[in-house]
Amino acid sequence: MPGLASILNIARRALFSQRTGMTVTGHNIANASTPGYSRQRVNLIPGLPERVSFGMLGSGVVADRVERLRERFIDRQLRTASSSLGEAVSQQQLLSQVEAFFNEPSDTGLNAVMTKFFSSFQDLATHPEDSAMRNGVLQQGLLLVQSFRGLASNIKSLRDDLLTGVTAKVDRINQLAKEISDLDVQIITARAVGAEPNDLLDQRDLKLDQLSQLAPIHVSEDSRGSVMVSIGGTVIASRAGAVPLQATVSGTQIQITAGQSNLTINVTGGDLGGLLKAANVTLPGYLSQLDQLASTLITRVNQLHSAGFGIGAVPPTGINFFTGTDASTIAVDPAITSNVNNIAASADGAPGNNSVALALAGVGEENLLNGGTASIMQYYSGLVSGIGSTIVSANSTITSQDLILTQLENQRSSVSGVSLDEEMTKLIIYQRGFEAAARLVNSVDDMFQTILDMV
């Protein structure tokens, strides 16, 4: 039969439960601005009732467990958006550097330099025997060579620098993978003894969020709460430990390999994916286009120039204007730099003939590229506009993904974020409950004293 001791036990449970609620509330308030923290809530349930002659009589309240409020679906969406945003930001930053290299439109960009180069032959055609005009052609040729080589060098240097950036990202991924694996072991150990390690779970989720910015990850969780984290289908973190990644160079490609098996991982998103795409696809593509432009220019100018004649007692002929095969190796032929009279303007060696100079002046407008559908100037304009379009696309992706990420973070905050107003309200409720339970203890004490006085 229930008696005063049962009432005192109800009060004891109430005091403990309200105290637990105040502790959890205080923990929430203290971590309101802690990155990655998820709001916690004490789950209060009625105690098991006691059977009495007239039915079932309640036994008070029990603090069942402390649970954290977290929505896994939002976490997965947020990590996907974070990976897409990271890739777009990496691409945009690198492309902005490439755009600065080309510096178009400007008076010093390659477009203006090529225009002046072809115009110098037009000027030579008006005075084919004038040394000043020939020196002008030489100077414009040297500027053209400098522009091509400068662009090629800058693009190659940027690509070489990307290996350092990729290595830094890989090192950060390895660090996070190890921390996630260590936290996973701690979580499994805590759950094995019946504890719910909410703060450790928050720390692990924060590491997973940070990892998703670097590369697209897939996270699977088993019944014990242990996670397996994979990139490109390869597990890099689990309770068994972390698998280290390495950045290696294979030919002209930067690759990511895993573990001692050197298994190649295909990283297609995040900061790392953006850097790899830039290093393996974007920058080589731009350099290839620039080389194609330079090669076509070298070939066509040399073809016309070698068939023409310079000036002299015996007009020189068969001399190329350029040497080299691409944007990195293009140079003005030493025969031209040593003697501007070797610059061909005449088609037959006759004084005053300007046919070759006129032909060279028109090279920029000949349809020599893209299967004979684009001129040198049009091809270059297409290259520059392609860079601009890619930057616009990257900026658009950044804007859209940033908006999605903000919306998802707001959704997560509505579930897991700490509201100080709400916590203060709970604090008052728990405080009043504690005071009431304490008063119940006093009442039972008075009742015991009454019984003792009767004896």
Image: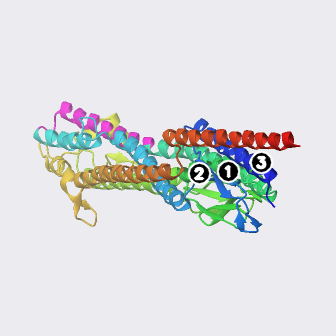
Determine which quarter of the picture holds residue 314.
Answer: top left
Task: Give the camera-side residue of 45 and 10.
Answer: 10
Q: Which residues are magenta?
A: 127-154
Name which residue type carries label 3.
Leu
Determine which quarter of the picture holds residue 28.
Answer: top right
| CB atoms of marks 1 and 3 within 8 Å | no
Q: Position of residue 308 (x, y in %)?
A: 23, 50
Task: Give the camera-side residue of 259 and 283.
Answer: 259
Mark 1 to mark 3: distance in Å?
32 Å
Mark 2 to mark 3: distance in Å?
52 Å
Mark 1 to mark 2: distance in Å?
20 Å
Name which residue type carries label 2.
Leu
Name the residue carrying label 3: 8
Can you tell which of label 1 and label 2 is closer to the viewer?
1
Name the residue carrying label 1: 198
Task: Give the camera-side residue of 176 and 103.
Answer: 176
Q: Which of the labelled discs sits on residue 211, or is there none?
A: 2
Name which residue type carries label 1.
Asn
Determine which quarter of the picture holds residue 331.
Answer: top left
Q: Label 3: few (<14), some or many (≥20) within 10 Å?
A: some
Q: Is residue 83 visible from the viewing direction of this image? A: yes
Image quadrant where one finds the N terminus = bottom right
